[in-house]
Image (cartoon, rainbow, N blue to C red):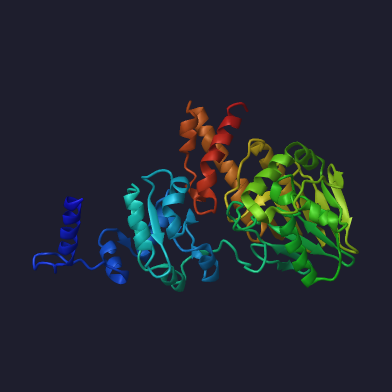
Amino acid sequence: MIKEYLVTAVSVCLALLPLSSNAQETTPLVGLEYLEQVNQRIHNIGTAELEALIAEEPSLVVIDVRHESEVNARGGMIDARREIIVPRGWIEFRMPNEVPDLDTPIVVYCGINQRSPLAAETLQKMGYTSVSNYAPGFFEWRDAGKPVKFTDRALDSMLFRKPEKVVDGVWSAIGATSPGSYANSGHNNNLSFVIGETGVLVFNAGDNYLLARALHDEIRKITSLPVTAVVLENGQGHAMLGSNYWQEQGVPVIAHVDTAHEIETYGTDVLQRMQLRNGEKARHTRLTMPDRTFDEKLVVDLGGLEVELMYLGPAHSPGDIVAWIPAKQLVISGDMAFHQRLLPIFEHTDTAAWIETWERFAALDAKHVIPGHGDPTNMAEVTRFTRDYLAYLREKIGEVIDDGGDLQQAYGVDQSPYAHLDTFYELAIPNADRVFRAMEFE
């Protein structure tokens, strides 16, 4: 006991002695001082360098390390080939899933270059080999008029964007051109409506019950006329999962017979995936079947204004239909036509048949086109990004097959003329895969 007491006493006495002149006092670096040292350990780039990387490096990932609420409230985010939001505090947890390849070129940024240098150093410590920090920050990019995008452009609504008038009597709530997500509430397709003399026709029920209700709220602000019909462009979730909201309001839901078959066969799985993605935003949504189906054509009279629902042939998905309004020279194309984002090719997509169907679609000679995805435009634009892309990809894959090439070579076909489109990074290789597998047996 005496020995233990003496050791303790000596330790206490030593602790109370003043430091010798040789001892080193260390003051922790904080704030801007620490940031200055971090900036010496990372690679910083400016606006011209970032623009060049976005234009020339197809695998580049641009990461905004601010919180999503900041992004949408303060002017958006940098628009690149592939851009994601990973807040600085989540870098270590989310990056292995978001960007699993450690050699992927990455640029990080924030608003005023305080969080992004720290994020860049963290990524380097995690093993990422090609990390740059955009030092000017988002606000300098935005104020210079460079391209920006939003994950939500209607912060007080479930809608990504609120309805905008296309022509008199026709409106569309334009969805995000990115994949459906919790952030955009599944509103990544266009939800359109036509106002006649006696009622309103809605084209697409929406991804979920709450999104359908949000669209209805906006319709009521524009017109006092009742919604008298809801039309499903196909059986995909963002077209049909909001049906039960409309049916609760007493509105009949109309679809092609093939769409009804798709819902009956795959609807439960589609609903479950949406519920996993949307969390509490999926509440009240349940799977229901259309009230009415048709084969080739159905005319809906809105009181002196006729909307022709038409099945023109195989296209993107089973049961794809368009809504043609001759009096306005306008077509709501659904997934027959895409704009501003790369179209996806599914296992059941027949690209050869889609090109043939396109000729019947083009014969409508529409002046105005509301595509399935992207801003309203004209026939020339949707032809460039739909029919022409399909023909181009089939030609390139055909060359691989004719030369005896394999699937790996198909993955590498040059799709760069379409690399500026949203979702290119996610879809270009899967599209090549599916076209190659289909054309092998044509």
Residue drawn 45% across and 74% down? 143
Quadrant location of the C terminus in the rendered image: top right
Tell whether 213 sits left or right of 86. right
Camera sees residue 24: yes
Q: Residue furthest left?
A: 21
Residue drawn 64% across and 52% down? 279
Q: Residue 68 location, x and y as percent?
A: 52, 63
Q: Does 78 sit above or below residue 279?
A: below
Q: Does 164 sit above or below residue 56?
A: below
Q: How many marks?
A: 0
Q: Residue furthest front?
A: 2
Tell whether 257 sits left or right of 158. right
Q: Does 246 sit above or below residue 256?
A: below
Camera sees residue 372: no
Tell whether 408 sits left or right of 388. left
Q: Residue 272 location, x and y as percent?
A: 68, 44
Q: Residue 430 location, x and y as percent?
A: 54, 39
